[in-house]
Amino acid sequence: MKAAEDEARKRSANDEHIAVCLKESDRLIGDLFTVQEEDTFSIGWNFNPHFGRMGYAQEAAEALVKYLFTERAARRLYAYVEDTNLPSQRLCKRLGMRREGLFKEFVSFRNDSFGMPVYENTMQYAILQKEWAFSRKSGA
């Protein structure tokens, strides 16, 4: 427990990790994260699947995108999404992001029964600040 508390304290020292809680109960349902690279940010999210298809991920991600473009002067945002993660692919599209590429066997999150890494194909989605601003003006 002490290690988890220490990690939470460390992550709360900046805005790279943001907890997402329900307004009504303050229950933690997910998190957002960013990694800055000059004027570009990598963004991502993790949400409890029990709260899927309720709009929480979209609401939180839209707020993060707006914050990064308006408060942090981001020029470009991108997200890595595994090709099997259909909910995150849909979220990227709803955020106005476009698919830029596919990285074959890019990352491994698990091992097979022999202990060998199972590599995932990963897509990159991105949006430029000027594209985001135009879509807000045009109501797209």
Image (cartoon, helix red, strand yellow):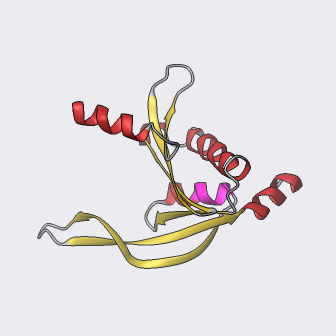
Vertical side of 62 occupied by 140: above or below: below
Residue range of the region highlighted in magenta in the rendering: 90-95
Callout count: 0
Taking the view exactly as shown, the residue that stands out farthest to the right is: 138
Question: Is 128 situated left or right of 49 in this image?
Answer: right
- Give the residue drawn at x 13%, y 68%: 115
Q: Is residue 10 visible?
A: yes
- Residue nearest the viewer, comparing 138 with 83: 138
Please name the predominant secondary structure of the magenta segment in the image.
helix
Q: Is residue 1 visible?
A: no
Q: Position of residue 120 (x, y in %)?
A: 36, 71
Vertical side of 120 occupied by 69: above or below: above
- Give the residue drawn at x 70%, y 54%: 73
Question: Is residue 115 inside the magenta stretch?
Answer: no
Picture quadrant where residue 78 is located:
bottom right
Taking the view exactly as shown, the residue that stands out farthest to the left is: 114
Taking the view exactly as shown, the residue that stands out farthest to the bottom is: 104
Picture quadrant where residue 49 is located:
top left
- Give the residue drawn at x 30%, y 35%: 6
Give the quarter of the figure containing the N terminus: top left
Q: Position of residue 80 (x, y in %)?
A: 49, 65
Q: Position of residue 74 (x, y in %)?
A: 67, 58
Q: Position of residue 4 (x, y in %)?
A: 28, 35
Picture quadrant where residue 117 is located:
bottom left
Question: Is 33 situated left or right of 2 in this image?
Answer: right
Give the quarter of the figure containing the C terminus: bottom right
Vertical side of 71 occupied by 74: above or below: below
- Give the residue drawn at x 43%, y 64%: 84
